[in-house]
Structures are given as C-alpha cells and as structure tokens.
Image (cartoon, rainbow, N blue to C red):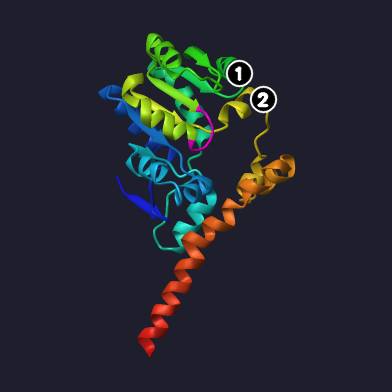
C-alpha cells in the first residue's frame, strides 16, 4: 500500500472502499490492528509529540481525514486519492457490519453519547450488532478493557479525543484483543445528533472548517492548526526550495 508523507506523518493513499477492504482483511486475520484517521490538527500536534508521531506512523492503517491534505498532496505532486474521514469510515464499516456479521463496540463521548449513537445507527442500519458501549470519561482502564474483551467485538470505535484516543489504543491494543480498533474522534457526537455535521455544500466547497468555527466559536484555537499545517507542508517547502535554487544559481 502506497503512502504519502506530510510533515513527517505517513498517510496511506487509499479510498474509503479500499480502507474497508483492508479492515475486512484485518478482521479475518484476527490480530489486533490500529486504524487512525490523521487530520491537519493531529499532524500539527505530532510535530512536538514524539510519542504521538510514532503511533501515527506505526499504525496499521492511516486514512487521510482532511480535504486540505488532499489538496496539498496534489500541489506537491504526490496526490492522495480522496479524503476518508473518521465519521465516514465509521458509517461505512457499520453498514458493512450488517452484511458481514461484525460485532461492534463504541467507546467515547460524554455520558450516554455512545449509547445514543448506537441507537441512531441501529435505526439507520438493520441487523447491526452493537455489543457494547461506554462513555469516554473513565479512570479505570482495566475495567473498561475487561468489559470490551467480554463483549468480543470485531471492531472497536474509540472517540476519546485527538491524541488521547490514539495513545490509549496503542497502549492497550494487545490487552483489548480486538481485531480492529479505529480512532474516530468526535464522531459519536455527530451520529447521536448532539452536534450537526457541516452540510454537503460546505464539504464540497472545502469550507467545513469554517462551518465548525461559526457553529462552535470556542474551537477557534483548534482551527489555527490549518494555517500551521499549510506552513509545515507547503509554504515552508516553497521557501526552502527557493533558497536552495538561489544558492545554486550563485
């Protein structure tokens, strides 16, 4: 599987359908695998967090969750095929689980959010098996791990917040003994209806970030990750290349 490197983070060059096929392979093999969905925010955070950077680069599947990543990759002549968001991957795998008889566990969100997300998905997709759910504000990992193991899921969706979810999954991957663990960020909030996803027109115009900022102004600090990402992946390279060219001309 080919990958594209953006600011030192490896991103797998896959479509959502290809990601689903790969995850099905993981489930059949049965060995615990970690699936992450890097976006500009986590790429920026990983610049100063070696542990997070190593986790992202060593994950078994790294789906590109950000249209800006796709655009930048094309400018750099290493084009990513498409954006694969955490929530789209969750919905895709949940839909497939009804056909494949995969067992699902939801971990994350505030009290009752994972349960509400599970109920919403059961309404949307017939015959899915959501075998358990647990909120993300726990202090006893051993108890949560034991609960997940006892449910024997094929896929664990974890929405514990950027950075925390990747570190928790990486630390406990073998203890969980789940074939596939997927980091999905705040997807449960959207699926449950607590938060609204940007409308299709905003996604198509690549201004989903602006919609989030307008509807959740408290996120403004997080949105600063986008210009930082563009600096790290695009403008910085342009300046460095220009300096090298100028030196060569001299």
Residue at 52% of width from left, 16% of height from top? Answer: 134
As measured in the structure, the alpha-carbon distance from the residue carrying label 2 to the one carrying label 1 is 8 Å
Q: Decide: few, some or many residues near mark 1? Use Cα within 10 Å; few <14, some 14-19, many ≥20.
A: some
In front of the other: 155 or 45: 45
Q: Quadrant of the N terminus?
A: top left
Indicate left or right for 105 with 187 as reference.
Answer: left
Residue at disc 1, secondary structure: helix
Task: Give coordinates of residue 92: x percent, y percent.
Answer: 48, 29
Indicate left or right for 168 with 30 as reference.
Answer: right
Task: Give coordinates of residue 79: x percent, y percent.
Answer: 42, 56
Residue at disc 2, secondary structure: loop
Write down the residue under mark 1: 120
Magenta-drawn stretch, dominant element (helix, strand or loop):
loop
Q: Is residue 237 above or below residue 245?
A: above
In front of the other: 2 or 40: 40
Residue 172: which numbered mark, if any? none
Whether residue 161 appears in magenta in the rendering, the answer is: yes
Task: Give coordinates of residue 77: x percent, y percent.
Answer: 40, 63
User: What's the magenta region?
Assistant: 159-163
Q: Say which quarter of the image contains residue 112.
A: top right
Residue at 66% of width from left, 39% of height from top? Answer: 198
Q: Is residue 182 above or below residue 242?
A: above
Write down the residue under mark 2: 193
**Do the residues under discs 2 and 1 have CB atoms within 8 angstroms?**
yes
Task: Give coordinates of residue 7: x percent, y percent.
Answer: 43, 56
């Amino acid at each position: 599987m080919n990958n594209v490197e953006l600011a030192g983070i490896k991103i797998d060059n896959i479509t959502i359908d290809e990601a689903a096929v790969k995850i099905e392979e993981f489930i059949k093999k049965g060995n615990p695998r970690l699936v992450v969905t890097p976006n500009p925010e986590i790429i920026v955070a990983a610049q100063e967090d070696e542990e997070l950077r190593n986790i992202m680069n060593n994950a078994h599947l790294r789906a590109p969750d950000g249209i800006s990543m796709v655009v930048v990759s094309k400018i750099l002549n290493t084009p990513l095929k498409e954006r694969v968001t955490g929530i789209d991957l969750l919905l895709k795998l949940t839909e497939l689980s009804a056909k494949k008889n995969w067992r699902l566990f939801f971990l994350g969100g505030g009290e009752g959010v994972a349960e509400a997300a599970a109920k919403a998905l059961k309404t949307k997709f017939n015959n899915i098996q959501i075998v358990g759910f647990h909120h993300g504000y726990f202090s006893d990992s051993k108890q949560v791990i034991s609960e997940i193991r006892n449910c024997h899921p094929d896929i664990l969706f974890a929405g514990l917040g950027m950075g925390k979810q990747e570190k928790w999954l990486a630390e406990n991957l073998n203890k969980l003994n789940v074939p596939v663990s997927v980091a999905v960020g705040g997807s449960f909030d959207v699926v449950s209806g607590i938060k609204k996803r940007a409308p299709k027109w905003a996604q198509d115009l690549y201004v989903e970030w602006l919609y989030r900022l307008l509807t959740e102004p408290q996120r403004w600090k997080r949105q600063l990750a986008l210009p930082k990402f563009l600096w790290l992946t695009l403008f910085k390279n342009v300046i460095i290349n220009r300096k090298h060219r100028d030196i060569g001309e001299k």
